[in-house]
Amino acid sequence: MTTEPSATLIDHVDPQVFVTYVEKTRWFGGKGRPFTVSAVRRLGELTPASGAEPRVALHLVELTYADVAADDPHRVEHYQVPLAFYAEPETRLDHAFVGWWEEPGRGWVHAYDALHDRAAMACWLDAFAAAAGAPDGALAAGGLLFHRIPGHAVDTTATATLFTGEQSNSSVSFGEDALMKVFRKVTPGINPDVRVHDVLTRAGSEHVAALYGWVEYVSPDGDVTQLAMLQQFLRTATDGWDIALTSVRNLFAEADLHAGEVGGDFAGESSRLGEALREVHDALAEHFPTGRGSTPAAAVAATMSARLDAALTVVPDLASYADGLHALYASVASLPDVEVQQIHGDLHLGQTLRTALGWKIVDFEGEPAKTLAERSLPDSRWRDVAGMLRSLDYAPHVVERTRSDDDIDELNQRHVRAYEWAHRNRNHFLVAYAGGEVGPDERVLLDAYVADKAVYECVYEKRNRPTWISIPLEAIARIVTT
Ligand SMILES: Nc1ncnc2c1ncn2[C@@H]1O[C@H](COP(=O)(O)OP(=O)(O)O)[C@@H](O)[C@H]1O
Ligand SMILES: O=P(O)(O)O[C@H]1O[C@H](CO)[C@@H](O[C@H]2O[C@H](CO)[C@@H](O)[C@H](O)[C@H]2O)[C@H](O)[C@H]1O
């Protein structure tokens, strides 16, 4: 089944309208960089079942950055901006106002970001519900293609609510029934978040929110761009990062006790997280089409070294650790081939949710700065394990930083407790993941992945939270001096 080719170049709207709007959103990743809106295309249109307002149009806004060379693949990016159109101003949506203009053949319209509008969001839900009854669970609607996985009847009466947290995409819950994640920065190709959820849902994994469906645009040339996915809403979920921070705060409240002696000890959860990740990795190795493979260890080491060299230009403070890090990566080069498979790719505590039925892992999109092609490559399981170990190191050090007004003895005491908490929880996580001790070759590989992740974090913190850069930098100092 294909969609009718409907991408239309929109030239009746002042591009500056979109510049102004995307710059003030949370999800725009190019803040502070010089860019122009080089094109706006309309991918499809949806209308409420009642035929009443609003009409919804999905726009793809093409941005061109002036701070990268013309041949750089990162020069152009595409952001999805679905709009809800009303003939008159809708003051309840003032915070989501994008602009007003004359639509050819339709007159003047007031355009709002559709994700803030429950009436507009009902159009997506209705199309997903209709797709369930379509042949192969795929329904062409308004120039888009809606896919459904059998097994769950979505509640079309549920009210849409936009999540307000820090996100690189936008998520809308439909009552307590379903969650739709609308991808903001989009690239043609299969989104790993959809692909992984699809495979794990069909495999019956207990550690992801079940996928209900997804929506995509198929160009006249057959190129697929995935725009959003609909999945199970985990109504009893609490963010793993928040639980870990609470555990550390409990410990700091009684800093003369050890981590295992205070209420709110996280070690049991760390073990359960290790088991959950192991099960997800096993399911991906068994069911993901790329299966298991291997890659020469020298290639893994070379990639790590290259990432370090690139990071040095952004974070000059890394220079004093560069020799030690290169030496660590060199020890990887002489290992046997490294096993690879589909993994998470950017795992940390903020990507884990504790529910009444155990731990779930979310957001399988991989590292945001990588291209879709890079994010879709099989990789070592140890990259995910390293991501969690780094996160279990971040948690106590983040809490430690928020409490600096005490006397020096208390500060020192908390510093010691922070290391104990990290050590205890990393150990529990790792032993549960590995089912015992980690072998010597795997230890070298894991240490290198931990260092590689900390190098990545230095760049991430420098660009996003410069006052936090000491957390990964201190970790690197410990890695190269032990
Ligand atoms: N199925 C779900 N049910 C309930 N909450 C969820 C679900 N999936 C993700 N979340 C929450 O939504 C937030 C954003 O999800 P995430 O996939 O990480 O989005 P992004 O790619 O925008 O970072 C997460 O912090 C998580 O707490
Ligand atoms: O959640 P994203 O996929 O956008 O991941 C990015 O942002 C993360 C921060 O929100 C960042 O994670 C780093 O900080 C976390 C604490 O805030 C910590 O738990 C992680 O271990 C640390 O890497 C992530 O690296 C980045 O890709």
Image: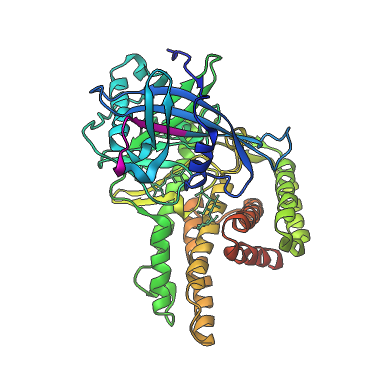
Where's the N terminus, which quadrant?
top left
Please give the name of the residue rendered at 70% of the width and 58% of the height, measured from the top-left corner.
Answer: 315
Where's the C terminus, which quadrant?
bottom right
The vertical placement of 149 against 232, above or below, is: above
The vertical placement of 106 against 335, above or below, is: above
Measured as percent of width and height from the top left, residue 190 is found at: 52, 28
* 476, 156: nearer the viewer: 156
| Residue found at the far right of this picture | 323
Left or right: residue 185 versus residue 444 is left
Measured as percent of width and height from the top left, residue 49 is found at: 25, 23
Left or right: residue 38 versus residue 413 is right
* 115, 176: nearer the viewer: 115
Measured as percent of width and height from the top left, residue 37 is found at: 58, 34
The vertical placement of 160 against 402, above or below, is: above
> How many numbered dots are placed on residues in this image?
0
* 153, 413: nearer the viewer: 153
Is residue 84 found inside the magenta-colored segment of the image?
yes
Left or right: residue 131 versus residue 4 is left
Please give the name of the residue rendered at 50% of the width and 25% of the height, measured from the top-left corner.
Answer: 12
Please give the name of the residue rendered at 23% of the width and 23% of the height, measured from the top-left corner.
Answer: 50
Please give the name of the residue rendered at 42% of the width and 18% of the height, measured from the top-left corner.
Answer: 143
* 360, 287: nearer the viewer: 360
Measured as percent of width and height from the top left, residue 274 is found at: 46, 52
State the scheme by which the image is colored: rainbow
Tell me the quarter of the picture where residue 246 sits.
Answer: bottom left
User: Is any atom of residue 274 visible in this view?
Assistant: no
Is residue 210 found inside the magenta-colored segment of the image?
no
User: Is any atom of residue 33 visible in this view?
Assistant: yes
Q: Which residues are magenta?
A: 81-92
